[in-house]
Amino acid sequence: MYKGFLKNITEPSLEVLRYVILIAMLFYILTPLVWLFITTFHPRGGPYLEIPEKPTLENFLILFGIVKMRVGAAAHPVYMHKWLLNSFIIAITTMIIVVVLSAMAGYALSRLKFRGKSILMASLLIIGFMPTIAKLLPLYKLCIMLGFINNLIGVAIVVASGALPVQIWIMKGFFDHIPRDLEEQAWIFGCSKLSALFRVVMPAAGPGLMVVAFFSFLAGWGNFTVPLILIRTETLFPVSLGIASVFLHHPGEIGLAVEYGPLCALSLIYALPSIILYYLTRRYLMHIKLARIEVGV
Amino acid sequence: MVEIFLEKATKYFGDVRAIEDITLKIRSKELMVLLGPSGCGKTTTLRLIAGLERLTRGKIYIGDRLVDDAVKSFTPPRYRKVSMVFQSYALFPHMNVYQNIAFPAVLAKWSKSDIRKRVLELAEMFGIKELLNRKPHQLSAGQQQRVALARALVIQPEILLLDEPLANLDAKLRTAARAMIKRLHLKFGCTTVYVTHDQIEAMAVADRIAVLNEGILQQVGSPDELYTKPANTFIADFIGSPSMNIVECTFDEEKSILDFGIFHIKVPENISKALKGCSDVIFGVRPERIEISPSRIPDGVEMEVYVVEPLGDRNIVTVSKGEISFKVVTPPTFKVDIGTTVWLKFNINDIHIFDKKTGKAII
């Protein structure tokens, strides 16, 4: 035992080292979240980290307009619940557009042979990884023409166009792993090509659709650049733009005009979907069991 | 019920020939095996019957309906009233066993109670009643195979197509499943086309076998016919295990002998007549039809034992002399040592002679 003790001192085992690194990393990642969490439940949340003596849900109530703000406070919390709704509208619309289009395009790219397919695939990937900012000028002009200014659906369409290329690739990958036998078997049993697609291929591609839904929802939910150029009215801001605007409108007045409590509550809610969605789709994300039946073990 | 007729069926994938000029009638209620090495076109033939591929030339009839004439007329798979079991079993991964088996009946718009009754009946018959709520990936290969068969039979098909149905099973299961398929065929009486590369499996289940090689139909016949009267050297070599001994020799018309160089065999007049005009021929004899003795036989061929493989129920003895060697199947009681001298005798009724140029059987 004595020997073991000495050994522990002189040769710190890898186990210990592992924990040290892990704790350092957690500290690095979690500090802002912990800060957020503590301030959210503080009745007089400020720019300084302070553990509340009496935790309260008041900030959430202010956020949703159930409790009136105290006199003399800044005006921005009035819009916060609208920002949440706006973000949700953008995210859901983006998700629907991306899931529907990437499923169709992915299936076509996986199953059909046509001229120029490899060039199309390559350009999809290249365009997909281009930063949106690079396309900003023509995009902006186009959006004016199409009436996308101050239009949440317009924002979703633009965000979806940016997310689509990579998601099409992901969907194609899923379809590639669904054996053709499944479709052919469905045809033989009496399905038309279209009904085989909806009865067999799409359900078998379910995990892929979930993954694409996950990514595209978050793409809409978290997007900042597109609303920044398209949305002018404060009531139509999504959360990303809203939170930023609070700081942009009140430079140098930190602590006075910024209502930290409700803002932290908003931020906390804003962070939730990634956790919820991850929880819902984790089995598809963690070990994406592609729809292949392993035969013969 | 329904017969299938292929008339000069030809299929090319680009420039690659899959099958060429196959004319084959599959009789009603018959179990026809398409047999051949991999890449011989047997699966393509099956897929053509199912409607998963289109002919390049020729015609296919199912019953009296022309389903594919390579030009205009083409019936898509869903109207052909065929059922098929794929080599992969193609179970739908998002459905449980019950839903999988019910799938064809659901598409045929059966009532819920009829479907339930039928699925339970089949599940009982295939011994998969406890598995109805499982997903395909939770099943063993043998269970998956039975689910696939049950699904293929749920709406009494007239034609059943089986693509290597036993290939994914281990050896022991395979023998049992083979027997099950044969019983099923008797019970359901569908016209069945069964694709396999395994000649023993083919012999075991088939009413008739069609042997293909490199896209060409080699011979059609009952297992017995293929075994006793192979049409060419390919069939002779392919059917039977161990396969037929095949040795090149020359026929000497004057002396009426088959000359192997180091020995010769005298042939009777009727064979000699049939061989008139051929000099280069191929001699074939089944290993189980050779007489072997450790002591001298009159007119026997003297050879040396090269190797002995005791298999328990029989021994396979390989004997050789010079460049020529024969495999001989003997009872397990036949004991010889490697290197000893033995005498072989060929029964003249059991020998096969093929034309060396064409490979076709002469007698």
Image (tube, rainbow, N blue to C red):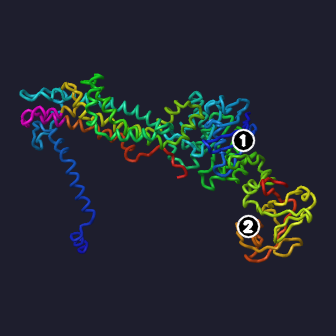
- Which chain is disc 1 placed on? B
- Few, some or many residues within 10 Å of mark 2 (<14, 14–19, 20+): many
Tell whether label 2 touches label 1 (CB within 8 Å): no
Query: Residue B160 is drawn in which quadrant?
Result: top right
* As drawn, A167 above or below B329: above
Residue, x 71% and y 69% (percent of image)?
B310
Do pointers 1 and 2 mark residues of a single chain? yes
Query: Residue B336 is drawn in which quadrant?
Result: bottom right
Query: Residue A135 placed where, x, y %?
Result: 28, 34
Query: Residue B358 placed where, x, y %?
Result: 78, 53
Query: Residue B75 placed where, x, y %?
Result: 64, 30
The amino acid type found where label 2 is placed reads Ile
Q: Image check: A135 left or right of B276?
A: left
Between circles 1 and 2, the one closer to the viewer is 1
Q: Image check: B269 left or right of A253?
A: right
In the image, is residue B248 part of the stretch drawn in magenta? Answer: no
The residue that disc 1 covers is: B21
**Number of numbered tags placed on the structure image:** 2
* As drawn, B36 above or below B91: below
Q: Quadrant for the C terminus of chain B, please.
A: bottom right
The amino acid type found where label 1 is placed reads Asp
Q: Image check: B224 left or right of B39?
A: right
Magenta stretch in the rendered image: A243-265
Q: Image check: B239 left or right of A30?
A: right
- Which chain is disc 2 placed on? B
Local secondary structure at mark 2: strand
- Few, some or many residues within 10 Å of mark 1 (<14, 14–19, 20+): some
Query: Residue B328 placed where, x, y %?
Result: 77, 66
The residue that disc 2 covers is: B316
* As drawn, A285 above or below A203: below
